[in-house]
Image (cartoon, rainbow, N blue to C red):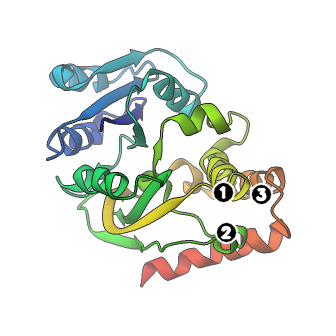
């Protein structure tokens, strides 16, 4: 079973090496690695070049942002399973993809596998938040719960059937895709009680007040677009649920 992993980057030399090493050091060998660069002007491409023999597809050109770049990666992917690892993040250990593959092979009817995530300090890897998932029901999705997107691995044909990431929803494009797949199309997914990703804090959606308000508006649009009842209530519940990740 081939698993395609997409990393999207733009001027991200600071943490890229750790991201790449976390993939190429996996115990599971049937990995197709795809990097989509937005035309970086720092040392990003020099780092990529060091590991070029491990990278199956590389595009470096201007794009319309993160989700446009991810969609380019999806178009290139030839694996049965597809996941996304942001350039600031890393797989939690060298057995992660082996466990993801095992999840799909032991449950051939499932469309998706997801797990747990730790938010870590960019400076010293100290764990700041713990996102522990669960085996979710349709009711959970309807009430604002979602799996941690960086831990989500999907069967590739789903993108042809149900569509790629939207380019008009800003940082809520991943939430929209999850609502579309889990709520509208009711895909079958399983939760693995496994730490999948270590994710550095300081993302685009929460860097300042304007970003937070923008993320709130985009999440609301995604909820409305996918027909979730009482979207304001659901959105408030979604945001408040994150408080539990600090304990």
Residue 31 in the image: state x and y as whole percent. 26, 35
Give the spatial CA distance, label 3 vs label 2: 14 Å
Q: Which residue is mark 3?
A: 223
Task: Judge from the rendering whether residue 58 lies leftward or rightward of residue 30; answer left or right.
Answer: right
Give the spatial CA distance, label 1 vs label 2: 8 Å
- Asked if marks 3 and 2 touch (Cβ < 8 Å), the reply is no
**Which one is in front, 54 or 122?**
54
Residue at x 39%, y 58% (from the top left corner): 107
Task: Judge from the rendering whether residue 123 lies leftward or rightward of residue 189; answer left or right.
Answer: left
Q: Which residue is mark 1?
A: 186
Q: Nearer the viewer, mark 3 or mark 2?
A: 2
**Element assignment for label 3:** helix
Q: Nearer the viewer, mark 3 or mark 1?
A: 1
Q: Which residue is mark 2?
A: 138
Residue 102, picture quadrant = bottom left
Task: Judge from the rendering whether residue 52 lies leftward or rightward of residue 202; answer left or right.
Answer: left
Residue at x 77%, y 57% (from the top left corner): 223
Give the spatial CA distance, label 3 vs label 1: 15 Å
**Which one is in front, 97 or 127?**
97
Residue 117, picture quadrant = bottom left
Residue at x 42%, y 26% (from the top left corner): 77
Residue at x 52%, y 17% (from the top left corner): 62
- Asked if marks 1 and 2 touch (Cβ < 8 Å), the reply is yes
Residue 139 in the image: state x and y as whole percent. 69, 74
Q: Residues within 10 Å of mark 1 (few under 14, many from 20)?
A: few
**Which one is in front, 122 or 86?**
86
């Amino acid at each position: 079973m081939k698993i395609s992993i997409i990393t999207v980057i733009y001027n991200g030399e600071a943490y890229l090496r750790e991201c790449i090493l976390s993939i190429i050091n996996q115990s599971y060998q049937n990995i197709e690695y795809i990097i989509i660069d937005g035309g970086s002007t720092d040392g990003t491409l020099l780092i990529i070049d060091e590991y070029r023999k491990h990278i199956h597809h590389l595009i470096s050109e201007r794009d319309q942002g993160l989700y446009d770049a991810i969609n380019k990666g999806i178009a290139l992917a030839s694996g049965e399973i597809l996941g996304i690892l942001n350039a600031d993040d890393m797989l939690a250990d060298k057995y992660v993809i082996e466990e993801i593959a095992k999840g799909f092979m032991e449950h051939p009817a499932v469309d998706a596998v997801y797990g747990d995530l730790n938010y870590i300090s960019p400076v010293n890897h100290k764990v700041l938040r713990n996102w522990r998932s669960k085996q979710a029901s349709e009711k959970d999705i309807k009430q604002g719960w979602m799996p941690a997107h960086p831990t989500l691995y999907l069967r590739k044909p789903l993108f042809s059937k149900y569509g790629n990431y939207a380019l008009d929803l800003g940082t809520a494009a991943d939430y929209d895709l999850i609502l579309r797949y889990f709520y509208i199309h009711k895909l079958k997914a399983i939760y693995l009680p496994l730490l999948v990703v270590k994710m550095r804090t300081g993302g685009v959606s929460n860097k300042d007040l304007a970003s937070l308000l923008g993320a709130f508006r985009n999440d609301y649009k995604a909820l409305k677009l996918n027909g979730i009842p009482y979207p304001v209530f659901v959105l408030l519940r979604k945001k408040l649920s994150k408080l539990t990740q600090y304990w």
